[in-house]
């Protein structure tokens, strides 16, 4: 008699608020996918290594929200494990040499303030879209 077991929920580590990285453990070779509250995929899937370990990077716009994590293996999907994403450090793009502007991504509605090396504010704060 063959017995088919469902995929187990992923085991989650602790989110690194500086990098947005989340360690995940599950079935080796399976794929980890982040999901929004409606079950839609977020970010890029990550394949777990031969020990069943991997790291997914939470997009900056998930900061302060609840995100689902599932494991997929072929046509099977694990139950969702939810994680409360802490406030993540904003992600900085490159400086546009023509304008001096820097693309910043993070939690919509969050305020970002540039600082000099001593921590003093530089310019005006900006609210993220």
Image (tube, helix red, strand yellow):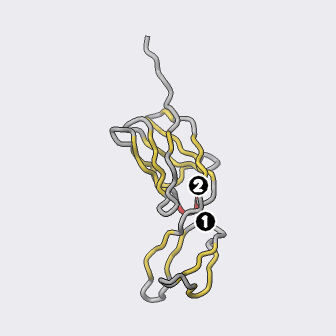
Q: Earlier in the sequence, mark 2 or mark 1?
A: 2
User: Residue 126 is drawn in which quadrant?
Assistant: bottom right
Compared to residue 52, the image places residue 2 above or below, namely above
| Image location (x, y in percent) of residue 20 | 50, 59
Q: Residue furthest right?
A: 109
Q: Residue at x 63, y 59 (%)?
A: 64
Residue identified by numbered label 2: 85
User: Residue 122 is drawn in which quadrant?
Assistant: bottom right
* Foreground disc of the pair 2, 1: 2
| Image location (x, y in percent) of residue 82 | 59, 45
Q: Secondary structure at mark 2?
A: loop
Residue identified by numbered label 1: 107
Q: Is residue 25 left or right of residue 90?
A: left
Crowding at dot 1, Cα within 10 Å, few <14 / some 14-19 / many 20+, comes out as: many
Q: Residue at x 53, y 53 (%)?
A: 42
Q: Residue at x 47, y 55 (%)?
A: 21
Compared to residue 42, the image places residue 109 above or below, namely below
Q: Secondary structure at mark 1?
A: loop
| Image location (x, y in percent) of residue 4 | 47, 21
Compared to residue 110, the image places residue 55 above or below, namely above
- Residue in front for this viewpoint, 86 or 4: 86
Look at the image and tell me in which quarter the N terminus lies.
top left
């Amino acid at each position: 008699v063959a017995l088919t077991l469902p995929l187990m929920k992923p085991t989650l580590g602790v989110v690194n608020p500086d990098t947005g990285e989340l360690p995940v453990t599950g079935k080796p070779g399976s794929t980890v996918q982040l999901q929004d509250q409606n079950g839609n995929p977020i970010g890029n899937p990550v394949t777990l290594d031969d020990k069943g370990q991997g790291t997914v990077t939470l997009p900056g716009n998930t900061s302060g929200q609840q995100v689902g994590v599932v494991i997929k293996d072929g046509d099977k999907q694990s139950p969702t494990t939810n994680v409360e994403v802490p406030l993540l450090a904003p992600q900085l793009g490159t400086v546009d040499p023509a304008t001096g502007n820097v693309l910043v991504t993070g939690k919509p509605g969050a305020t970002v303030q540039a600082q000099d090396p001593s921590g003093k504010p530089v310019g005006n704060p900006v609210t993220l879209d």
